[in-house]
Image (cartoon, grey):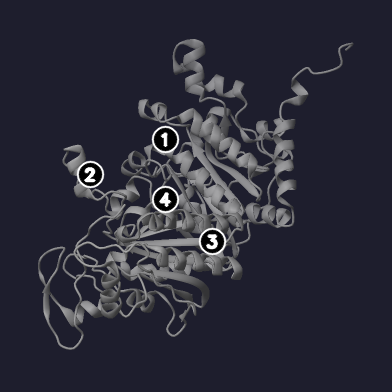
Amino acid sequence: MTTVVEPAVVIPADEPKWAKCRGCGKPNYLPRLRRDHGVCRECGHHGRLTARERLDLLLDKGSFTQAPTRYRSLDVLGFRDSRPYDERLRTSRERTGLDDAVIHGTGEIAGRPVVVAVMDFGFMGGSMGAAVGEAVTAAAETALGKGVPLLVVTASGGARMQEGAISLMQMAKTSQAFARLRSQGVPSICLLTDPTYGGVTASFATLGDILIAESGAAIGFAGPEVIAKATGKRLPDGFQRAEYLLEHGMLDRVEPRAGVRALLGRLLALLAGDGAPGDVAEGTGVVTDPDAVPAKPAWDAVRTARDLSRPTTVDYIGMICGDFVELHGDRLYADDPSVVGGLASIGGRTVMVIGHQKGHDTQELVRRNFGMPQPEGYRKSLRLMRLADRLGIPVVTLVDTQGAYPGLGAEERGQAWAIADSILGMAELGVPVVSVIIGEGGSGGALALATAERVFMLENSCYSVISPESCSTILFGDPSHAAPVAESLRLTAPALLWLGVVDAVLPEPSGGAQAAPAEMAATLYRAITEVLDEQRLMSPAELREQRFERFRQIGMPWTGAGDEDD
């Protein structure tokens, strides 16, 4: 499908001029606008760039080498509208100096190699015909052959109508090329710029491992005018803009143009396993003997685990990670802020870190839904874990939740299904997985992020099939018996270590993790890095088997199983 979008304004470089901004309507001084890479200083509107301008902006100076094979679409259908197609091609080539609507080749970003394919909206609206499909596929094949990341920058109105079904088939060709990258663990990043529509959006543009959009970019399948006419409804404010799509879970990041190159450099470093090591003090070792963990009343442990001053997932990430790039969205419905996840560097090693996030004040607690995920949170988590699995990156999860959110919408969107898929998905991962209960471990909502071959607990955390208050209400009709019920549930760290539910306990500083967050972070850092060092040489099959056997053994001594004659 092709969406008609207003063509870009070509800014002459030979003399200073003023032009009205398409975002705010205020005058822009064109030499300054060029220095600002087409971004209006008044409103932040991002004007369109040519493919060569985009390459100059993103790649290290002088690093780009264009692929020797150039692709040009031909008028195989003899298509004619108000003008013959071959005449339109000739005019576009003369105006842009391009063979077709994409340039591809190799280059570097922050000194790291990358294969690039950059679209140019100025060439027939960046529409995808056979030449574009071939160039994007060739770029993917080059990335596959070299084993280096692929970066595709899109700017397109969609499929090229003048090439009929040949254009349509390019959606399948390019999608298959991306599938091969996925199967071989070669990373791909797609940068979606204004506009990206139609068959380009519905194929390679949204198939990258990481999807980044420039601020304000219009992105969709059908154009907004088409949708408004078809539905007869007023479209929401910001509909199909990058920020709207981020909120609805379709993108990993939305970045202003000035920040894209730096973000790409960080991502490429993390994908190469060369992230910053961070600066963390020597921590305390884990405890594996239940008798060596100080006993305390279960209800005290519950209240301490819920203390809003305790470090959260975001706090720990800031203390133990040399770098962290948060990735958003479930690619289906929304981005759930109660689950935070992304690529991180721990001890110079790249991991996918994921965790529940509560908050320290009312505003953040409400925004994060008190750390209780909707289905979208679990689907985001599983998406990121599967991405880590494809790329051979270990997974670290930090668990701190009362449980999955018990809401009407959550049930309608498949809360139980999302939890089940997450548990099963973690069981299938072929990379090391370590989970740490840092606060509350509430029922299946916690287990959905804790199906790992190594599960640790902080000394003052708790982990249970149900909250003490809910259990008391079910058994006694009200929550007043929560304290004795907590004792009966055996939800404390030493009890769960003795039961084999967790593998080790992380000692907390005097006064709890909230009293000395940096000290607690150092212990957490040591526990994670030691496990990852132990597991780094294990095969995917060995890791899956270890995970299976860990959970297979839990509860066996208490099942009463035995021979029939016993």
Left or right: 9 in relation to 96: left
State whether residue 278 appears in this view: no
Marks 3/2: CA–CA distance? 34 Å
- In the rendered image, residue 437, in percent from the top left (x then y), is placed at 57, 41
Which amino acid lies under the numbered mark 2 shown in the image of this protein? Answer: Ile
Q: Amino acid at mark 4?
A: His
Residue visible at 38% across and 46% down in the picture: 249
Q: Residues within 10 Å of mark 4 (few under 14, many from 20)?
A: many
Where does label 4 land, which residue?
Answer: 328
Within 10 Å of disc 1 (Cα), the crowding (few <14, some 14-19, many 20+) is: many
Above or below, comparing residue 557 to residue 429 in the picture: above
- Type of residue at label 1? Gln
Choose the circle earlier in sequence order: 3 or 2.
3
Callout 3 secondary element: loop
**Residue 158 sits in which quadrant?**
bottom left
Task: Specify the quadrant of the image occupied by residue 275.
Answer: bottom right
User: Could you tell me how far apart the alpha carbons at marks 2 and 1 are, in whole angstroms?
Assistant: 29 Å
Q: CA distance from mark 4 to mark 2?
A: 26 Å
Question: On the picture, is 495 further left or further right than 12?
Answer: right
Q: Nearer the viewer, mark 4 or mark 2?
A: 2
Q: Which residue is mark 2?
A: 227
Quick check: marks 3 and 2 in contact, CB under 8 Å?
no
First in sequence, mark 4 or 2: give its number. Answer: 2
The label nearer to you, 3 versus 2, is 2
The residue that label 3 is drawn on is 187
**Spatial distance from mark 4 to mark 3, Cα to Cα?**
17 Å
Does residue 25 appear left or right of residue 170 in this picture?
Answer: left
Q: Position of residue 501 (x, y in %)?
A: 67, 33
Please state which of the two labelled residues, at mark 2 or mark 1, is closer to the viewer: 2
